[in-house]
Amino acid sequence: MSTYDVVIVGGGLSGEVSAVLLAQRGYSVALCEAEARLGGRCHTDQVRGFSLPFGFAYNLLTEEQAGLLTSSSERGAQWIYFSDIPPISYEHKGWIEIPKERLTTEQKSFFVRHYAFPKDGVQNLIQAYLKHPKIEIHLSEPVLECFIGGGGGREREHVIELVGKSGRFRARAILMALPFSSLSRLLGAQIKQAWARKLKQYRMISCLRLDFVLKSKVSDFKNLIFNLENNGVGLFTSNLDDSFALNSEQISQWLYFLDENEVHDKEEIAKKMRAAKRFIKKAFPDFFDKTTWERIGIMVDFLPQKVEPFQTQEWTNLKNVFWARGGLSAADGRHQWFDELLKEVGKTEEYLNSFSRKEDENISNPRLQHKTPG
């Protein structure tokens, strides 16, 4: 059984970016993903010849952040800049420019005016970097158990053993790129309870998601549309990137936020869905006449929002387990997750370097070679 420098559990954007950064720094990485594809909630579905971004999730990297994933020999991605796109205005439909100060907390999470995103979406950009020779990708590989201190002899305190669907993995360090619910299932009592209680103070955003494919364009909008009255947001994706739709066709996506009571009440969700469709029809009278495909779903707890500032602290007693927290950032700093991830990757690298130093010390000192940690 091979021992990797790092096993990353979770193949969403945080797991993918972590794998690329660690591999580029010379570490062997096994990336385990429970689903049959990578990307998590940041992926693009292929629907009837269209590329449909999942829930606005294509805009989670800035150009500067993506630049850290490339080497000097790699060709940079093509980017679309929102700053080059005219502001929101559609006078005869009653749309006006909305100052950011008037947006709700949820809407600020999707306020993308000053951002850019890679052509064809984030996953198209990331896939090229994941071909690094030091990265092994294991799809349909849920990690079922995690044994801390696996192995024997002097390795026991340093090596982690994970049990997956198809076999076992051993690693000197593990980076969890998982939501907290999955993290707590794998590590259980190893998580500090005071930290877990603090985390529960976060409020999670849920929403009703409406995706549409239209046989012709109904709007020339080229930016995010805000509907303050119904606390939702909408986007015509194919106006921003012609790689998402063919010819004159158009893709439209809408999110309507649900509170904690609504998300578990089918009748309230149905009311929200009817209200959303009435609003779209009012804004674009011929919208549903031109719709050729639609998908309606619920995104439960898909984006965390801080109730109060969360102070970073040690969350576990384990020295070689790390957590790529991903989306735990304030709405006004939507890309702050990347900075947090860089810190965690840095901690992982620091531990691996210290592990290597201990190995060198053991080799140079024969008396330490057969010493079993107490």
Image (cartoon, rainbow, N blue to C red):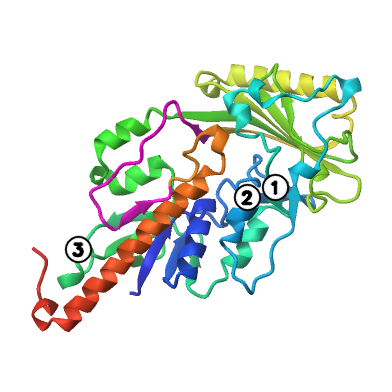
For the image, the number of numbered tags is: 3
Q: Can you give x and y, in whole percent of width and height, for residue 43 in the image? A: 63, 50
Which secondary structure lies at badge 2?
A: loop
Of pointers 3 and 2, the one earlier in the residue sequence: 2
Q: Which mark is residue 157?
A: 3
Answer yes or no: is residue 176 visible.
no
**Comparing labels 1 and 3, the label whose residue is closer to the camera:** 1
Q: Quadrant of residue 288?
A: top right
Under circle 3, the secondary element is loop
- The quarter in which the N terminus is drawn is bottom left
Do the numbered discs 1 and 2 sit on residues whose CB atoms are within 8 Å?
yes
Q: Amino acid at mark 3?
A: Glu
Judge from the rendering whether residue 205 lies leftward or rightward of residue 171; answer left or right. Answer: right
Residue 116, numbered label: 1
Q: Quadrant of residue 271?
A: top right
Q: Which residues are magenta?
A: 302-324
Residue 108, by quadrant, is top right
Upstream in sequence: badge 1 or badge 2 = 2
Mark 1–mark 3 contact, CB under 8 Å?
A: no
